């Protein structure tokens, strides 16, 4: 079922819901899902409506014009998107296949509603798997001594295919600040720890050394500061003294896959709103 | 913060949210929490608003009169309650203390917003614990050959203290049909299994016999059919071959406590709506 | 690291551990993992040792001969297996791909140590995916009016490829009793509910109807009685009133995949012992 | 059932299990539970046996003498304890009651096998609850300008009642280094975060600020370095943007109670072995 998603963030106040609801009702909009959140701490209000496209007599352009005065009145940051216009996604990976394979499987089986424009990797290992799915594969090796040319090529590819979302599916490279800024809140990374524990490299080694009893994974938007961007989704799994680092890595892979897939799905369905480096996720 | 809770269930349609939001906005009602649910299967719509009491210039009686026409128009089942008018609860227990002690602790520490009118038990074991909390304790022994006099006395006590909610905190007796009907959707039981598995007596024995790898607990409203009422909350905990029935009982106690406390809190905060023997829980 | 796995079940008694430990120590066997379990209820004792193959100066045949007297003395049911001799597995599927794709991915990435002899399906949908992995695919359509010829062909294929383990990866067909008996405790099924809840067909529909707050999946050995065999592994995921049956199916797929993969791995690593229709799982 | 618990840690090698099993078998010791762990990283071996006391013809003193040569041969750190000699515990608390109330309830209902010698608090709030349980209550106020006299009095009380275990049940004070050293691996603290995240004060505020999707609690042995001692047990609970800091505190209390009770039970049953600032927990 095709829907429109109206996503709003604005300073809290009386009458916002009424105005928006009235507006939708005046067009006989059939709301299939509605979510609100008042954040007492920041004094902001967040709102998401999902509306049956076939219930509205107007197109998105007309909607945007008609809604603009309300948006101005309440100083809203807002957008309306169409579920039929799927977002264009570029996946970036390195050698490890588990997250990439999982996303490709979910995409192919219709669980992730997006277009996958291409896969970019600094290695060639995953080419065959990607191409079997009918998706272009670009190897862009990264020279550790001079990463700039590689990232210029990554940026060129991303622009060429008009990507709207970047997913770092265990890419193992730090994106340049320029790309982070350009795609603010549109680059999703999976970090293989329960952030803010074990920032940086080799989190399972850190976890084993510290002797924790749970390990986790975190899907977050990438910002210029490493592993410090807004958290979209997290989960954990229990470990014991019996689990070597290799076991932890294997257990962790399942959590990473699950958390990244959920985080990406929330993003694709316009369920994530960012404010003050934190997310509101209307799941 | 004192709030009013407006809880609505009605056949789904266009404009319900707008009408209710407008109504609240026309009184400058400050909505602190709003939840909606459209059930595609049944075609019903469920809604709960929490409104700051000090933002409304009218009292509940005036609210009810003013809102009645809207309620009629949309054939709403509805109520509005005042968080300052705490519900009167009667707890029923037998010999096992874990659920009762947990509820009393949470009540005493302010986590469960209710009045506990009294505790009724068929045994005398828990009297001292209850009385230390300053709560009346009534022992009403149940004669297995003739339960009627006991249940007549239970009904008398329940009416005498004007109970609004009954909680079977491991009461181990089947309430008579008459009381179930009178307190429909207001008697909460904790069943020590993950229903619908292991209905009836000795669920941990049944679970051990079947060799399940998780055991659970279920908080549900009591209906005349045993263990078949609407489920409010459930949870599970992992068990292994190492866990004897005694271990399962101990592990299960923690789940039972947690699930009953959550279920009761949802009920006390008017977060549970019942339709077609299922619940909508706006947690 | 190549290991031998010594798996023992016998009536409990004093001195079993000492005899087995002595035996292993007399050959300088390096034990990398040891697990014991005394079941008070049945009076049986269960034991699993994992021993570095390169620490033993004898081969498995010699081990079996030397150990036989001890086994007889304690009336042991026992086996010793070699991690280097991977079990031959036949996967059976229908149209739904999630469990099959997950197992193939884990097998390909080295997480499931087995040989996959072939995939058998009553449909042709999954052929391309299977063949990309280099695994033979046999379509054996099942005529609902006369299933016998199909199951005769399945049995022939299973025998032909010398299968040691059958995995019903959402096969959606009930195996004939003869095959269940022949492969007792070697046919693993994934049932899409938290057994014993919702036995039989359409468990997510049953779950939605009953209004449960958690849905689950169960990996179990197949016996002649439907969905009643020994449970190997189970897990659950939380659902709410917002989750339609379609959502439950999607959430359930992730649990099914995880539970089946864990259950199969336990089996492949000889971690599962069956007694009295229950399992001891030394994970 | 009265048992002896033989707990051993030593450098790994061939024949340890055989020697210990033989020793126990030579006295006809009936082993009810046995756990082993080889740590590949450190090259150490850990072992715990639980033996029916009535199956051994010798007392603990004789056992210790007879076992000493084996212990020397393998350079074992070891102890044997008697389940009938319950450990003497001192609980330290501040104003918050949830952990203390939970431990007292579990102790009273027989779930925690220990003697509770007394409760020490820097405040007087919890006196009535403690004394209702028949346990002495000592208020030892801590002067923030000069904490030494208070801790001298705490140490005096602890020595006077011959405490073997100290439990910091949300004590909110940092124990002096001297007491930490004296009771090394015998002081258990509950930290209200999923360590190593959010070390130090106000972890729920830190968690809210960072926008994590799960909050947790950690039971650990106290060392001189704040929140850095060996972790015994951890758990988490899911939070969302809807959960204010106050909600997090309430949700966290349930996790803290559960984690501390489990951690303490493991300690009381001699299930925790410490090596290299990490624990082996034979649960």
Image (cartoon, coloured by chain):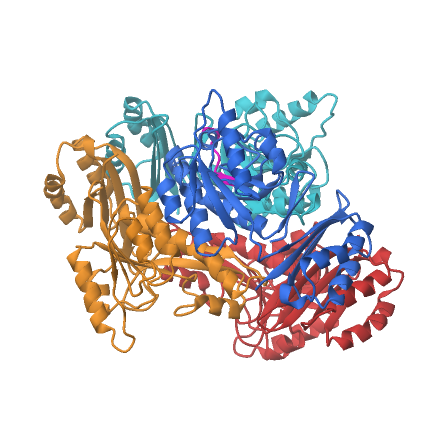
Chain colours: A blue, B red, C orange, D cyan
Query: Which stretch appears magenta?
Result: A209-218
Kindly tell me whether residue A156 is visible in this rendering.
Answer: yes
The correct choice, above or below, for B276 with respect to A3 in the image is: below
| Residue B199 placement (x, y as % from top left) | 47, 68
A211 is within the stretch colored magenta = yes
| Residue A240 placement (x, y as % from top left) | 42, 38
- Residue at the right extreme? B57
| Residue B103 placement (x, y as % from top left) | 64, 56
The correct choice, above or below, for D104 with respect to B181 in the image is: above
- Describe residue D105's horizontal placement relative to residue C142 as left or right: right
- Residue at the front extreme? A160
The C terminus of chain B lies in which quarter of the figure? bottom right
The correct choice, above or below, for B117 with respect to D282 in the image is: below
Q: How many marks?
A: 0
- Describe residue B100's horizontal placement relative to residue C46 as left or right: right
Query: Which residue appears at 52% of the width and 28% of the height?
Result: D229
- Describe residue C255's horizontal placement relative to residue B75 as left or right: left
Give D126 or A9, whichever is nearer the viewer.
A9
Q: Toward which corner of the image does residue B176 lie, by quadrant?
A: bottom right
Q: Toward which corner of the image does residue D151 lie, by quadrant?
A: top right
Query: Which residue appears at 17% of the width and 63% of the height?
Result: C156
- Describe residue D12's horizontal placement relative to residue C23 as left or right: right
Query: Which residue appears at 62% of the width and 36% of the height?
Result: A182
| Residue D113 placement (x, y as % from top left) | 49, 43
Query: Which residue appears at 10% of the width and 43% of the height?
Result: C65
B143 is within the stretch colored magenta = no
């Amino acid at each position: 079922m095709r829907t429109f998603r109206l996503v709003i963030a604005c300073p809290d106040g009386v009458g916002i819901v009424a105005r928006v609801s009235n507006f939708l009702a005046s067009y006989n909009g059939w709301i299939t899902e509605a979510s609100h959140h008042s954040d007492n701490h920041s004094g902001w209000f967040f709102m998401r409506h999902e509306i049956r496209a076939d219930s509205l007599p107007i197109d998105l352009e007309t909607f945007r014009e008609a809604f603009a005065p309300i948006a101005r009145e309440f100083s809203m940051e807002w957008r309306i998107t169409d579920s039929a216009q799927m977002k264009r996604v570029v996946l970036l990976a390195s050698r490890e296949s588990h997250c990439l394979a999982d996303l490709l499987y979910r995409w192919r089986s219709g669980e992730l509603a997006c277009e996958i424009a291409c896969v970019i990797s600094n290695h060639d290992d995953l080419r065959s798997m990607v191409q079997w799915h009918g998706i272009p594969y670009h190897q862009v090796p990264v020279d550790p001594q001079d990463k700039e040319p590689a990232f210029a090529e990554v940026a060129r590819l991303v622009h060429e295919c008009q990507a709207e979302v970047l997913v770092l599916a265990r890419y193992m490279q730090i994106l340049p600040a320029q790309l982070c800024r350009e795609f603010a809140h549109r680059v999703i990374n999976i970090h293989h720890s329960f952030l803010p524990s074990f920032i940086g490299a080799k989190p399972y080694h850190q976890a084993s050394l510290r002797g924790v009893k749970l390990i986790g994974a975190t899907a977050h938007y990438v910002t210029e500061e490493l592993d410090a961007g807004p958290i979209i989704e997290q989960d954990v799994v229990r470990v014991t003294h019996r689990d070597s680092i290799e076991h932890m890595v294997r257990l962790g892979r399942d959590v990473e896959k699950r958390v990244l897939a959920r985080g990406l799905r929330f993003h694709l369905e316009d369920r994530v709103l960012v404010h003050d480096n934190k997310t509101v996720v209307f799941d």
